[in-house]
Amino acid sequence: MPEHLIEIRDLRVAFNGQSVVHGIDLDIRPGECLALVGESGSGKSVTAHSILQLLDPAITRIDGSIRYDGTELLGVHERYLRQLRGNRIAMIFQEPMSSLNPLHTIERQLGESLALHKGLAGAAARQRIVQLLELVGIQRPRERLKAYPHQLSGGQRQRVMIAMALACEPQLLIADEPTTALDVTVQRKILLLLKELQERLGMALLIISHDLNLVRNIAQRVAVMRGGVIVEQASCELLFSAPQHPYSIELLNAEPGGEALCREPAENLLEVRDLNVRFRLGG
Amino acid sequence: MLTLSPIGQRRWARFKAHRRGWWSLWLLLALFGLSLGGELVANDKPLLVTYQGDWYFPAFKRYTEQDFGGELPFQPDYRSAQVRQLIEGQGGRRWFAPIPFAFDTVNYDLTEPAPSPPSSDNWLGTDDQARDVLARVIFGTRVSLLFALALTAASALIGIAAGALQGYYGGWVDLIGQRLLEVWSGLPVLYLLIILSGFVEPNFWWLLGIMALFSWLSLVDVVRAEFLRSRGLEYVKAARALGVGDAQVIVRHILPNAMSATLTYLPFILTGAIATLSALDFLGFGLPAGSASLGELIGQGKSNLQAPWLGLTAFFALALILSLLVFIGEACRDAFDPRT
């Protein structure tokens, strides 16, 4: 087995002739957690998408080299890529709201990947789906099988997405801003879940985020991206204790500070007393 | 019946709540059912003949005159006085359908020259060839609706496929496809049909084929737009990231979402198909001569202004069918409206 699961060399991506990633080198080792951090538009998502080549081929041009387990991925046949996607390399996306098809039940969406790569169907598939839902911490998974995405909360949806990605026990999980659309407490839970699953399943995790401080607890290595190039690549401890590049420092200091404005408590604008809301949970 | 998703259930409920559309649907289905069973309602052969203690079903089975004690080895004209005497002379009876005429039965017993006004024999009168108008309307409705349904199914199939491919692949496929469509939609259908009728006698299938070549165009844009929008959605990306192939992504993930736009369109394509077929029949480029057709009835009404029952019948029949379809279409549109 090669030392690196993914080897990216001199990757260049251009949309309609406009270059957005200008020749980056990046390695992902088996079982490690690598964070790719940078501001919006720095090319981090594009880099991640180009590993599985999910960018629109009509307008995208990718040059350079991406090797998976020693095999060149750029220019490889679509069928080989499909067999790789979801099976060896899985991906979860930023928006759990829209990453699940609103017309399919949880069971059906999870079952799709299982049927595709493992040939599982019927009772065997259902058993595995329940297992997966348990794995990602969905409570009462059996009752959730027939639920539609809109009946789940944002955090639950992201958990389902993670379960989908883990269905075939991939060697690499790419998480593209997995927590951006979630609120802060849920963010933490999802990150810890990802970390825990990564250690338990021994897979590599490429986590993409714009928030350096967020990945501090889970990443082993961090690559900082800006304007389509990687400006600094270091172990997590080193980067946080002694950042080299001015941009890394800037990012580290970007944590919002200050305090909320205090105002004299005036009359209540809105008063709620003894409010109850009930609805039937789907199933 | 497949189980509907919650969205589907809500749409169905909204469709049902649209009273006018809901009743129109049932009325149209009833009319369609009636016209499909037209042989039981309007038939020049008796539904049942009792003859010498045996039962005969001439409407469904072929008998010869010899079976009823006649001399000729042909199918008898059950309406004729002679056959009546043969059967009733032996104590038999003939049970006719409510309208004892088929669409092509000539009524030789008219007391005045055809077209004859409505009477107890011919409820809506006869046309200029002494054929019963009501029977012709029933069979004409059947042909119109079947034609429209077949045409709609064909257009939906081609239109959705073309729109899906263009929208999903985008880029050059889309660009070239759109240009081809523009050229294609510029071809004059009516002239093609007129030219065609010089070569072959256009029958049901010819007309269907020619019209299907052009009627799918209106659906393409709707489906294409929906696919262009959907292919960038995250769940489509997520499905592809799971290794799902193009065909499956199209069928399982995008098509169900594009269906609502398509379904909304279908009743209006139906309406268009019925109107077009009637227009062609009216002009004489439609179904072969002698076929029951609403358009042909309008034509007769135009050339026989002294017989207003022809034009009025055709008008009310067409107006009823088209209005029902439009009402159903409106209800569909409201049911699928994402804003409500």
Image (cartoon, coloured by chain):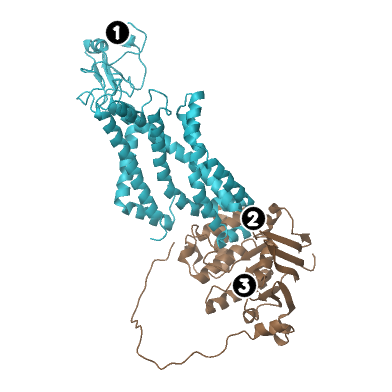
Residue B225, horizontal then vertical, whole percent? 52, 54
Q: Indicate which disc residue A194 carries.
A: 3
Which SS class for mark 1? Answer: loop
Task: Sort mark 1 into few (<14), some (14-19) or many (20+) by Cα contacts within 10 Å.
Answer: few
Which amino acid lies under the numbered mark 3 shown in the image of this protein?
Answer: Leu
Badges 2 and 3, same chain: yes
Is A198 in front, or is A37?
A37
Q: Quadrant of residue A168?
A: bottom right
| Residue on which the image places disc 2 | A117
Q: Image point 43% across, 92% down: which residue?
A: A263
Residue A95, horizontal then vertical, whole percent? 55, 68
Task: Sort mark 2 into few (<14), some (14-19) or many (20+) by Cα contacts within 10 Å.
Answer: many
Q: Image point 29% across, 51% down: which residue?
A: B19
**Label 2 to label 3: alpha-carbon separation:** 22 Å
**Label 2 to label 1: alpha-carbon separation:** 75 Å
Task: Tell me the shade of chain A.
Answer: brown
State the cyan chain. Answer: B
| Residue on which the image places disc 1 | B69
From this view, report whether residue A97 is shown above or below residue B211: below
Q: Chain of mark 2?
A: A
Q: Image point 39% across, 41% down: which residue?
A: B271
Which SS class for mark 2? Answer: helix
Q: N-terminal of the two: label 2 or label 3? A: 2
Q: Residue furthest top?
A: B71
Which amino acid lies under the numbered mark 2 shown in the image of this protein?
Answer: His
Query: Is residue A88 shown to the viewer in this render?
Result: no
Which amino acid lies under the numbered mark 1 shown in the image of this protein?
Answer: Gly
